[in-house]
Amino acid sequence: MECNIKGLRAIALYRVSTDRQDEAMQKKSCQDFCTENHVKLIEEYTEIDVSGFKVPLKERNELIDILIRAENRDFDLLLIYNNDRLTRRSDEAPHILQVLSNNDIRVFETLTNNEIRTDSHMDKLINFFNSWTAEFESIKTSMRVKSAFAEKNEKGRFLGGLPYGYRLIRTNDMNRKGQYISRLVVDSEEAKVVKIIFDLYMNKNMGTVRIANYLNSNNFYTRKKKYYLNHNMKLSQNEFLWRASTIIRILKNPVYIGLKSYNKTRSTRDKVIRNSQDNYKIQPYNKQLRLISDKDYYHVQDLIEKRKKNKNKLFTAATISDNALCSGLIYCRCGCKLKTGYSYNKYHRKKDNKDIKKKVYYYCCPNHIVNKEKHKEITQKTIYGISKYDSIINEVIANEIKDFSVADFNKMLSTIECTNYNKQYELNSFILLREKLQKLIYKYEMAIDECLLNNDQEKADIFVKNINRNKDKLAKLDIEIQKITDYVDSVKENVKKLKDKCKFEQLTGIYNSCSLNEKKAIISKLVSKITVCDDEIVIDFIY
């Protein structure tokens, strides 16, 4: 190197973005450069675990400090191991070099002993190309890593993220780097808590906040809190408690039915974006991870969807209330969902000469305020006493469960399924006939081409008539196929709803002894909607 830099003051910048990169190697290279060129190294800056691609300049405190000192002319040279240690962002590299150049700070790569110059347009073009190349290498590396991760996920390998209810064990298998491979296994203690969470949400009609409070008050500790307690570490009263957000993540996690999800986030250059649950990908089914049955898991997902606050939703679910049996399911005849409320009834009791103040709960239609005219056109009633209407509905549900006959139900279901089987057979026959007609039309079309080549117009006209006749048959057949398809689909839906009625067999003798919240959970499985008007109650069962 012919540049005269003897005696100049230098600052060295080392950037280590991964554990595999050697900080000592960068330091030795810069220190050797200073020794060979008689440069005075006045300070060294080290950036640990800083990506030159993902971390922007505004978040790199050491580099910002160097640029500030450059403006104060505190040093003469900036030493870096190679150009990508400065940055891998092609839009930031020219700015950094320009700030240094404007303040007469020279930049050297100690790996090649070359100076990074900015004197001419060609120098600037070369610098931009080098930084663009470094950025492109980062993108390619990221793509390779993503591809490798995707391949391992498709094989069901553990790649991080320890869900609650599981622990890691080390297997005897080793990866290419000689490290032992870990895998997930069920943690029996945490698994009990997961099952409690699902049971409370599904069978006790408890929401995520109430479940979190229940766990906290009954000494079911979070993983982190348990760790602190086991190691006698200091812990504040409200630290590491169960939260509603944690509960909902557990309820939505498919790992509990043996399907571990991945692709939960995606990285851009500047930030990590959380994907919606629809974009999650699933590892192959692993029966050793199962804690919850498919039936219970998907029922919980249905309840979560129904309980979302969405004004345009067409379905409903029982809401959480300690005082109303039908909250969330009961509607006014005007179509508006009834809200729960209460008032105080004050009276003097002569028996013991006491003033009594009693809380009275009721259902109220919001439309009598929001849309008064529409409400009055349909009904004059706006308030329905909870004690009166809940007792009637409770009796109807109890009798429906009591009168359930398994034998009669199975007989009816068998008749429906037999009819559906015959229709399905007819549908399959029509589909086969349709395929034959299509093949016949195709043969006629090929024959027409041959007739035209042989100038046999008369025969071609006959084939055209046959094609038109078969196309008419095909159109009529399509109408019949659509009718039968619609019928079969509707029967399948009805059979599904009827099979839901089998739950009655399990509930016989249990319903009357359940708590209010347990009854609400049962009703939400059996009833889609309850409509009240004056002295009329209409219960729409799901079957």
Image (cartoon, grey):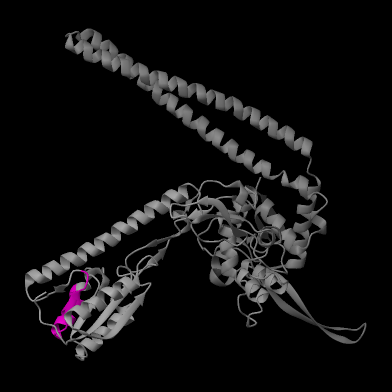
Q: Is residue 262 left or right of residue 391?
A: left
Q: Quadrant of residue 105?
A: bottom left
With respect to residue 307, does 501 lie above or below? above
Q: Is residue 457 left or right of residue 475?
A: left
Name the image quarter holding the C terminus.
Answer: top right
Q: Residue at x 28, y 80 (%)?
A: 63
Residue 238 % position (x, y): 63, 80
Q: Is residue 80 covered in magenta?
A: no
Residue 341 % position (x, y): 67, 73
Q: Residue at x 69, y 34 (%)?
A: 413
Return the residue nearer the eye: 275 or 440. 275
Q: Residue at x 44, y 24 (%)?
A: 477
Residue 231 % position (x, y): 65, 76
Residue 169 % position (x, y): 59, 57
Return the residue nearer the eye: 134 or 326. 134
With respect to residue 84, does 79 lie above or below? below
Q: Quadrant of residue 253?
A: bottom right
Is residue 16 something one can see in this rendering?
no
